[in-house]
Amino acid sequence: MTLLLSGVDSFTGIHPFLLVLAAAGLDRLVGDPRWCLHPVVVMGWWIRRLQQLSERWAGDRPWALRLAGGVITALLVGGSGGAGWLLEQWALGRGLSDLRPAGLLALWIALTSALAGRSLEQAVRSVLQALPDVAAARTALSWIVGRDTTELNQAEIVRAAAETASENAVDGLFAPLFWMLVGAGLWSVGYGGAPGPLALAWGFKAASTLDSMLGYRQGTLLWLGTAGARLDDLLVWLPCRLVALSLPLATGCGPGGCLQGLVAALRDGVPDPSPNAGVSQAAYAHAAGVQLGGLNRYGDQLKVKPLLAAGSPRPNPAAVERMLRLSLRLELLWLLAGLALGIAISAVGSVQ
C-alpha cells in the first residue's frame, strides 16, 4: 500500500507530458488496430450486461431506472478510472528510479487507446474517398453517424462528414487529451498518488461510451441513460470551449482572434439541444469558413439543427480535409502547451 500511495512522486516536471506526447504520436501512427482488444469494447460489454440486469430489475419504473443508471455510471466510470490508476502505479512504481519497462510500455499503449485522432481521420476520409459513388459513401457514413443516411445526396453526405469530423474531434480527441494533460499536470507538480493521465482518460472514455450507448432519450433509456449522458456533458464542457477558444490559432490567426472564435461558436452553437455538439461544430464551421447545420433525419424523426456560420459556402470535400488538418494542428499546439508547462514546472522545481 505504501508503494501505491507513494507511486510516481519522482515522475514529475516534463516527464508526464512527454508520456502524453508519446501516446498522441503512437495514436497518429497506428490508430486503433483491429486485431487488438480495445478498452472501449470491454466497457461496452459491461454496459450492455449491466443494462440488461438493470432493466430486468427496474422494469418500467422511472425512479428505479434512474437509480440503476446512476449505479451503472458510478461502477463503470469508477472501475475504468480505478483500473487506469492501478496500471499507472504499477508501471511507474516509485518514479524514474523504479520504472518497469514492460509496465511503461503497457501504460503508453493504454494511453494511446484513449485517443481517436487517426481513427477519426480514417473514418471520415473513407466517406470522402467513396464519392462520387453515393451508395458506397452512404454505407461508409452510416458507420460513424447516428442520422439516417439512406436518402442523403452527395452534398448532404459531405455535410454529415464535416459535422462528424468537427463534433468527434472534441469527443474522441480533445476531451480525452484534455483529461490526460490534467493528469499529467497533477503528476508534474508532485501528486504522484493522484489519478494520472490514464486514470482520467479512461474515466472519461467510460462516461463517453455510456453516453453513446445509453444516451438516447427514448424507451427505458430516457431514464436509464440520464446519469451517463449528464456526466459526459459535464466532462466535455470545458474541453469543448477550450477548442473553440484555441482553434483560431490553428488557422494562423493571432491570439486576438481566439476570443472572437469562442464568441462566434457560442452564439451559433448554444441553441443546439446538446450543450457541446453545437459549439464544437460551430467552432469548426467558422474556422473552415463553411455553413453547417440544417435538416437531419433520425429514424422516423426529422430534426432541424441550427445553422452554424450561416451564409458561408456549404462544405465540400476540400473543406472537410481542412477540418481534419485543423484538428491535427490544434492537437500539436495543445501538446506543445503541455510541454511548455512541464518545462516551466521543472524550472521552478530546480530553483526551489
Image (cartoon, rainbow, N blue to C red):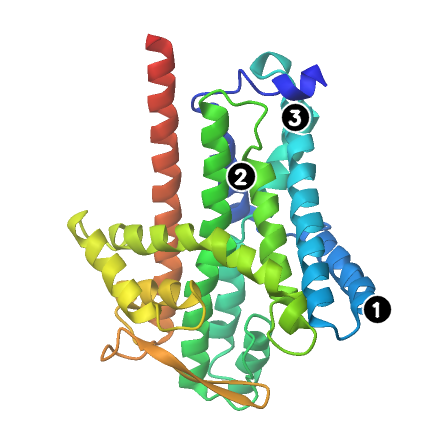
- Answer whether residue 223 is visible to the viewer in this image: yes
Q: What's the CA distance linking mark 2 and mark 1?
A: 40 Å
> Residue visible at 54% across and 65% down?
123
**Tag nearer the camera, 2 or 3:** 3
Does 101 sit left or right of 51 as displayed? left
Q: Mark 3: which secondary structure?
A: helix
Locate residue 42, reporting x and y percent: 74, 52
Query: Counting residues from the N terminus, which is met first, the one under dot 2 or under dot 3?
Result: 2
Does 348 sit left or right of 96 as displayed? left
Q: Amino acid at mark 3?
A: Gln
Quarter of image, res 95: top right
Report the disc number at residue 89. Answer: 3
Residue sitting nearer the eye, 72 or 291: 72
**Tag nearer the camera, 2 or 1:** 1
> Residue visible at 54% across and 42% down?
26
Q: Is residue 172 above or below residue 59?
A: above
Locate residue 25, reporting x and y percent: 49, 41
Q: Are dots 2 and 1 in contact, CB under 8 Å?
A: no
Query: Counting residues from the N terminus, which is met first, the one under dot 3 or under dot 1?
Result: 1
For disc 1, the neighbor class at 10 Å (few under 14, some 14 to 19, many from 20) is few
Report the disc number at residue 56. Answer: 1
Q: Which residue in the structure is indicated by mark 2? A: 23
